[in-house]
Every structure is written in structure tokens, then in C-alpha cells.
């Protein structure tokens, strides 16, 4: 299971729960160029960390006569560790590494009286200084002694003592740590001007609160969110100013679908974070920014923490999650996740996320290898096996995925993600009754509203697989009642029944609520662009969305969110015939640097409306060539490949609309995109038995059926109405529910070539090159350019690329690019479909 899924807000919530240090690399995760980039970043981090003083804090030893509570020994170490961690000049060895070093060397703390043992331990930990201590309680007085040993010879270079007679043991502990940390920082840092705040990194003075907090974090790392919530609640009940506990409580609640309940807890986290160190405050403020749609603000906060604490594995992990979930920049995500693992080889969630990132760029073998390492770290947890199964399922290996889901459930029969995914796997196989049985059992045993609502949604999907639209609506209505905060269920109802005044009112109410959210400074902008695209699709509530866009532009200081709102504002203004305001606003948000953090826009959510507006602008006499050129030049300056490619397509679209078809075709071919008219469409076919149900275009060799009049009559030789680089199979073939459609492209090559086939699709996809299956993605999502990439080989002469896309409902279509290994267009290749054109008995539209 991915750490981020369901909706963008959940997908972008990130947590900091650990800090770490660089170490020898324990696992080599690939030989691709991206790995080299990661190593370069790690080397930079190691240089920065090397400029800090490396300190190893050992366990405190209790005198044999110590009359002290059992928790005091660990409390001393943890509080001192966190106090020292606030110094940007110190690089602290994590406790787990210290323990591993003792085991490896076969020594104990008592052996450190021997200078040689201290020297060996310091060398093993690569530590400049070892800090060891002893403590005892004399009546009600707490005595603590600390000694510092140097790496060169293991000898003691300084001894310190502190004591406190405070009646409460915890108060005495805090007092002693305050004195010791102040003195130690003065000795270890180059300069110490003021007494530091103590415990800022943990933000609590209660050992009981901290105990519940750590237990809650452990539950969340295992994806047991229902179990984590009461633990965090207990922590903040004990310490009502525990900012990080409030933050994690909000995160857990949102993952369970309780967004409204989460809001006050996040507000408290922000309120109490201002008294903390920047190291702990920044992730809380970043979470607040992400929920508000202030993405660039969040990225800046993460980068500032990295600059101060480059060895902190947690913040690299956070930034990796941003690149993965928001920016969809999987290469950058891989760099951050591998950096996290380099710094902390036991960071379980980094392995989980890294596996998904590798899978998303087509390196599935790397992904499985990484998940095996994750399973070694968490052999008793179901999630490593659930993630393995989910990636198998994405690759269409459904029977294997079912076995792996069963293995996950053998570790925890109530692990909801695996039960949910198992039902989907049976749906993908066409085993509807098995899926329904699992879903009904899951529903009966679930109490959390997010789980119940999601299961009801799956049951609706099950009904759609059988063509039962009315029953599907009933389940969706129940899901919307169970979790009214999830707007997707209500939008799905309107999609199924466009004529329903009741469902239109649902959508209008959602827009009004969002307006209220922005007006009162709530989670502003978190669904705005998603809702704007659906308003355009349904042609409902456009005035409300236009107002929302204006409010966002006026209130948001985040360049990414503001620019996206302006981009939609341009579309809305085109519909009204006036673009002056949007053009002026766009000139104000042209900071190219921020585009490295911007996520790609999908065809469904933005580009179809942009290119539709370009057509509308042409009809109204606007200078579309200048507009398209503006997007093209901006894309080039942004160094964001997604915007660069769409800028080129926009330029080609303008030329096409201005009757310069040859120019348009050349511009597309220069980036490896065939003209939409080069594709020949076959279908639709009724899909009744799952993802692997076969139809004649894939069962018979292409060069046999294109020469057979029986089959060639079925070829549709026309393109869709919108020039946008996207092959809209729904429009061309007239699909509705449960349909599969095929598209065939003739690629003529002068030489044998190693190439990359790049796809982005609405629906599930299979692709064959010269009758050999080269890609299979059992994934439903929004089509994005270059989302899925696979290697292939062209032969000399004619090559046939057959693509199948299917889905239950919604859009069906795809993007395609043919490139060399570096992502550039392939030379000496033509897409002109001479053979197919000659065989077809329908009107042929050449080129675009």
C-alpha cells in the first residue's frame, strides 16, 4: 500500500518522526543514472555532515545502589539526545547504530574504562566524541555524571556533573538535562552565545505523553490508523501543548476520512509549534501549507531544514513524498528516498515508497527487490506484502497478486487495505461474486467511515461491472452519506445521472462549501482545481468556480497554486470572451524556477479544456499563435518537460487550426508524437470477463487481419475533434460502460532501433509491438504525458503498434510518444500508415 493515496490532500500529508545519520551503504538499489544522481546528493550531504562534529551518546548506566524509577535511564539519554540534536553544528549518531556497534565489537558499556575499547567504539561509529554517563538517586536528589572521550585514543577529555533536588523526578530530570546540555553545547560547538531551549525537538515534558506518541507513530508506520488515533489522543490529553502529537493525530484522522475532526488538532499543532525549534516546527507548518494548497511554501520549509540538518533522513523522506505525490517527479522522489535509506538503512517507509517510485518509471525488478528488503525489516507486518501484491496487480499479474494479498492477510486478517485490494483483484479477473463476498464481509466488520465508504464505492463498481447502474447509484449514495467529506462519491453520482437535479445540487453545495472554506481561512484551495475541471465537464456551477478562482488568486501567496488558478481563470475567461484580466495575472506569476516543484496536469483535469479553449479562441479571432508561442517559450524556460511538451503540442494545434497542417505534423513528429489521424481504431468491444478477456485484434497477428476484408472493414479511420496529442477513444468509438477499444499505428523505420514507448492513459492499457506484448498496466488514472515508459526494439520496415485501452466507465484514451533512450524523437522513422490506409474501406484522414 502506498503511503499516499485516495485524494490529493491525503496524498500530500507528510510526517517527520525520526532523524538519522549517514552510514555505509547496506544495499545497492540499482545501476541506473538516477542512482548516480542520488549518490551525488549523498556525497554532498556527507561533505556537509563531515563539517559537523560527530557525537555518539551512549546509554546512561545506573549505579548498583540507584534508587531510581526504571524509566529514568532511557529518559536521560533520550532527552539529552534531543537537546543536543538542536545544534546545527553537531551530527548525532542514532541510538540504533550505537547499539549495533557494541554488538559488532563484542563489548559492553563497562568495557569503556579501557581506553582501547573507547577508541575502537569511536572508530566504528566514526565519532569524534563519545558521551557516556552514570546516574544515581540519593534520597530525593538526582545525581548525573557525564564524561567525554576523544576518538584518537579513547581517553577521557572532560567530566561533568549535575544534580537536582526537585521533588518530582521528571522535574529533576528536566533540570539536570538543562544544565548538562548547556555545558555540553558550549564544549562541543564552536561558539555558544545563549542557553538553548531544552526538549524543543520533542515538544513535551511528559514521559507518559511521549510513550503514547511513540506507540502511535509505530501504529501509523504499520498503517494501523484506527489504532494510532487513541494513542495520540492520550498523548495530547496528558500534555495539552504537545505540538507534534497534535500534528500526527490530524494526519491519522484525515487518513480515516475525518477531515473536519482533524482541523482543530492541526490548528493546535501550529499554535504550539511556534515555541519549538525550527527543526520540529517546519514539518508542522509544511503540513498546514500542503493542506491549504500552498505547495511551494511547504517545499521551501523542507529545503530550509535540509540546509541546516542535511543528515536528517526524515526530511529527505518528506521531500521525496512531495515529489512522488504532488509533483509526480519520480526520478527526484527516488533520489530523496535513496538518500533517506543511505542515511538510515532501517527506514521502513522509505523502502515502501522507493519501490512504488521505481515501479512508476518501469523498473519493476528494482521495485520488487526493494520490497523484499522492506519485508526483511518488517517480517510480521502485512504492508510489505500488500505493496508487493499491489505492484503485481498493476502489472496485470493478478493470480500472483492474489496469493500475495492472502499472505498479507495471514499476518493480519483485519488489514483493511489488503482486503480492499484483494476484492479489486478479483474484479480485475472478472470474478464478481468473489469480490462481492469479500466486500460484504469487509463492510460488516468495518467501523471506520473511510473504510466503510470506500467499501461501498467498491460495491458500486461491482454493480457497474454487471451493468446495474441503478444499484450502483444506491451504493454510491450510501458511500456519500457515510463519508460526506469525500466529494468524489457525489461527483460519481452526477456522472452516472447527468440529468439529475438532485445530484447537480450536490455538486453546487460542494462548490458553496469550498467558497466558505476559503472565506474563513480553512483548508483553502485543497480541491479547487479538481472541482474546476468537473464544473467545466458538467457545465454546472461555472459562476461559483469562477468566483473560487478569483478568491484563490487574491488570497494565495503560493506561486504554484496561484499560477494553476490563473491557468483555469484563462479558460473561464475564454468562455466569456474576455482574457485581458487572466493574461495580466499570468504575467505576474511567471517565476520559472518554481515549476520544478509543479506537478503535471492531466488531460482530464486540464489539457482538454485548454485545447478546447484554444479552438474557441480561434473561432473568436484571438491571436492563438501568439498565445501558444507564449506557453511554448514559458515551458522551455521552466525546464519542466511536461510543460515543454504541451507547449509544443499547443504550437502545433495553433498551426493546425490556422490550416498549416504540414507544419503541425512536423512539430508533433519532432517530439515523437504521431498525428492523431495516423491511428486506426477498432471497437468498442463489450468487456465481461475482466482485464484479460481477449478480442480478435490481439488474438490474431496484425499482418494477417489487416489483409483480411472481414476485419479491415471494422477499422475506423478518423480522428477525434480536438487537436491535443491525445487519442480520444471514447469519442471516436462511442464507448459507454464496460468497453475495450483498440488503436493501431504503423511505424516505418529505416534501421533497427532501440526505443522507448511512452504512454499516459485514461483506463487500463495493453500494448503490443509486432504482436509481442511490451506493456501491460492494470491502472486506472488520469492520462498524463509520459506517465509509463517501456523499452522496445523497432525492426527495419513496417512495425505495428497495437494498443488496447478498457475501463468500466469514464474516459477512454491515451497519449503516446516514440523516443530514443534519452527521450528525444527517433530519427528515420515515419508514422504514415500506408498499408492500413490502403486496406480500410472507410474515409481516411491523413496526418493530424
Image (cartoon, grey):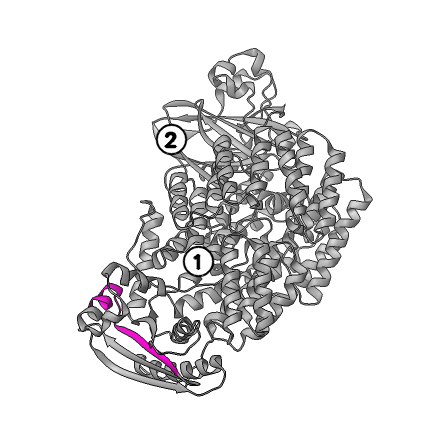
Give the labeled residue for mark 1.
317
Q: Please, is residue 837 above or below residue 584 in the view?
A: above
The residue sitting at the right extreme is: 501
Q: Seen in the image, is 421 located left or right of residue 191?
A: right
Q: Is residue 393 visible?
A: yes
Which of label 1 and label 2 is nearer to you?
Answer: 1
Q: Earlier in the sequence, mark 1 or mark 2?
A: 1
Give the labeled residue for mark 2.
828
Q: Seen in the image, is 211 located left or right of residue 107?
A: right
Element under disc 1: helix
Q: Is residue 293 visible?
A: no
* Quadrant holding the C terminus: top right
Quadrant position of residue 184: bottom left
Tell me which residue sits at (44%, 58%) in the image.
Answer: 317
Numbered range of the magenta stretch: 120-137
Q: Position of residue 605 (x, y in %)?
A: 61, 46
Depth check: give the residue in front, 313 or 705: 313
Is residue 671 one of those drawn in magenta? no
Quadrant position of residue 369: top left
Tell me which residue sits at (51%, 32%) in the image.
Answer: 398
Q: Position of residue 341 (x, y in %)?
A: 37, 55
Q: Position of residue 318 (x, y in %)?
A: 47, 59
Tell me which residue sits at (36%, 58%) in the image.
Answer: 344
Amino acid at each position: 500500500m502506498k503511503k499516499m493515496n485516495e485524494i490529493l490532500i491525503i496524498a500530500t500529508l507528510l510526517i517527520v518522526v525520526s532523524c538519522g545519520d549517514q552510514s555505509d551503504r547496506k544495499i545497492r538499489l540499482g545501476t541506473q543514472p538516477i542512482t548516480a544522481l542520488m549518490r551525488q546528493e549523498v556525497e554532498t550531504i556527507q561533505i556537509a555532515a563531515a563539517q559537523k562534529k560527530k557525537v555518539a551518546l551512549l546509554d546512561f548506566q545506573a549505579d548498583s545502589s540507584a534508587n531510581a524509577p526504571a524509566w529514568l535511564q532511557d529518559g536521560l539519554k533520550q532527552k539529552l539526545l534531543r537537546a543536543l540534536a538542536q545544534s546545527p553544528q553537531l551530527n548525532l549518531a542514532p541510538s540504533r547504530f550505537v547499539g549495533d556497534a557494541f554488538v559488532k565489537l563484542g563489548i559492553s558499556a563497562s568495557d569503556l574504562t579501557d581506553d582501547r575499547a573507547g577508541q575502537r567504539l569511536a572508530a566504528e561509529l566514526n565519532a569524534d566524541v563519545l558521551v557516556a554517563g552514570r546516574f544515581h538517586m540519593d534520597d530525593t536528589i538526582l545525581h548525573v555524571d557525564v564524561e567525554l572521550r576523544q576518538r584518537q585514543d579513547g581517553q577521557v577529555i572532560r567530566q561533568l556533573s549535575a544534580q537536582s533536588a526537585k521533588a518530582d523526578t521528571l522535574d529533576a530530570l528536566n533540570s539536570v538535562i538543562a544544565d548538562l546540555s548547556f555545558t555540553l553545547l558550549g564544549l562541543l560547538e564552536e561558539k555558544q552565545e545563549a542557553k538553548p531551549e531544552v526538549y524543543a525537538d520533542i515538544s513535551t515534558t511528559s514521559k507518559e505523553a511521549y510513550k503514547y506518541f511513540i506507540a502511535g507513530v509505530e501504529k501509523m508506520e504499520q498503517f494501523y490508523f484506527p489504532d494510532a488515533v487513541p494513542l495520540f489522543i492520550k498523548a495530547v490529553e496528558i500534555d495539552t501543548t504537545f505540538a507534534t502529537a497534535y500534528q500526527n493525530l490530524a494526519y491519522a484522522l484525515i487518513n480515516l476520512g475525518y477531515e473536519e475532526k482533524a482541523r482543530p488538532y492541526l490548528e493546535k499543532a501550529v499554535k504550539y509549534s511556534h515555541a519549538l525549534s525550527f527543526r520540529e516546527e517546519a514539518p508542522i507548518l509544511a503540513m498546514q501549507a500542503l493542506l491549504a494548497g500552498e505547495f511551494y511554501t511547504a517545499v521551501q520549509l523542507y529545503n530550509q531544514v535540509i540546509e541546516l540538518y542535511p543528515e536528517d533522513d526524515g526530511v529527505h523522506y518528506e521531500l521525496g513524498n512531495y515529489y512522488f505525490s504532488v509533483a509526480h517527479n519520480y526520478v527526484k522522489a527516488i533520489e530523496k528516498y535513496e538518500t533517506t535509506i543511505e542515511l538510515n538503512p532501517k527506514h521502513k517507509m522509505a523502502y515502501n515508497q522507493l519501490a512504488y517510485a521505481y515501479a512508476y518509471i518501469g523498473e519493476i525488478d528494482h521495485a520488487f527487490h526493494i520490497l523484499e528488503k522492506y519485508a526483511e525489516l518488517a517480517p510480521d507486518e502485512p504492508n510489505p506484502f500488500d505493496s508487493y501484491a499491489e505492484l503485481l496487480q498493476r502489472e496485470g499479474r493478478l493470480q500472483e497478486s492474489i496469493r500475495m494479498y492472502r499472505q498479507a492477510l495471514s499476518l493480519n486478517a483485519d488489514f483493511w487495505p489488503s482486503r480492499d485490494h484483494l476484492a479489486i483483484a478479483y474484479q480485475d479477473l472478472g470474478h464478481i461474486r468473489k469480490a462481492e463476498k469479500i466486500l460484504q464481509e469487509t463492510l460488516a466488520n468495518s467501523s471506520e467511515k473511510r473504510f466503510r465508504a470506500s467499501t461501498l464505492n467498491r460495491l458500486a463498481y461491482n454493480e457497474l461491472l454487471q451493468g446495474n447502474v441503478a444499484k450502483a447509484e444506491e451504493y454510491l449514495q450510501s458511500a456519500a452519506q457515510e463519508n460526506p467529506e469525500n466529494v468524489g462519491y457525489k461527483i460519481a453520482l452526477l456522472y452516472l445521472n447527468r440529468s439529475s437535479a438532485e445530484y447537480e445540487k450536490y455538486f453546487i453545495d460542494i462548490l458553496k462549501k469550498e467558497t466558505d472554506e476559503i472565506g474563513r481561512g480553512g483548508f483553502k484551495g485543497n480541491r479547487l482545481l479538481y472541482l474546476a475541471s468537473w464544473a467545466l465537464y458538467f457545465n454546472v456551477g461555472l459562476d461559483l468556480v469562477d468566483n473560487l478562482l478569483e478568491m484563490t488568486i487574491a488570497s494565495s501567496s503560493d506561486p504554484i497554486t496561484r499560477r494553476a488558478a490563473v491557468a483555469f481563470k484563462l479558460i473561464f475567461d475564454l468562455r466569456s470572451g474576455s482574457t485581458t484580466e487572466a493574461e495580466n495575472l499570468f504575467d505576474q506569476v511567471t517565476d520559472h524556477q518554481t515549476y520544478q516543484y509543479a506537478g503535471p496536469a492531466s488531460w482530464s483535469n486540464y489539457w482538454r479544456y485548454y485545447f478546447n479553449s484554444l479552438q474557441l479562441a480561434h473561432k473568436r479571432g484571438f491571436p492563438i499563435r501568439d498565445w501558444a508561442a507564449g506557453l511554448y517559450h514559458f515551458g522551455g524556460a521552466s525546464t519542466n518537460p511536461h510543460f515543454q511538451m504541451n507547449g509544443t503540442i499547443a504550437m502545433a494545434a495553433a498551426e493546425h487550426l490556422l490550416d498549416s497542417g504540414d507544419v503541425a505534423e512536423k512539430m508533433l513528429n519532432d517530439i515523437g508524437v504521431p498525428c492523431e489521424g495516423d491511428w486506426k481504431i477498432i471497437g468498442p468491444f463489450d468487456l465481461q470477463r475482466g482485464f484479460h478477456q481477449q478480442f480478435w485484434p490481439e488474438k490474431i497477428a496484425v499482418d494477417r487481419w489487416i489483409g483480411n476484408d472481414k476485419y479491415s472493414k471494422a477499422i475506423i479511420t478518423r480522428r477525434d475533434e480536438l487537436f491535443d496529442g491525445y487519442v480520444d477513444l471514447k469519442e471516436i468509438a462511442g464507448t459507454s460502460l464496460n468497453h475495450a477499444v483498440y488503436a493501431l499505428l504503423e511505424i516505418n523505420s529505416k534501421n533497427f532501433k532501440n526505443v522507448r514507448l511512452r504512454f499516459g492513459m485514461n483506463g487500463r492499457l495493453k500494448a503490443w509491438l509486432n504482436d509481442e506484448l511490451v506493456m501491460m498496466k492494470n491502472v486506472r488514472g488520469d492520462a498524463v504525458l509520459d506517465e509509463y515508459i517501456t523499452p522496445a526494439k523497432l525492426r527495419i520496415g513496417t512495425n505495428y503498434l497495437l494498443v488496447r485501452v478498457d475501463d468500466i466507465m469514464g474516459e477512454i484514451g491515451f497519449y503516446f510518444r516514440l523516443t530514443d533512450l534519452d527521450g528525444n524523437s527517433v530519427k528515420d522513422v515515419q508514422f504514415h500508415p500506408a498499408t492500413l490506409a490502403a486496406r480500410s474501406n472507410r474515409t481516411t484522414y491523413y496526418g493530424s
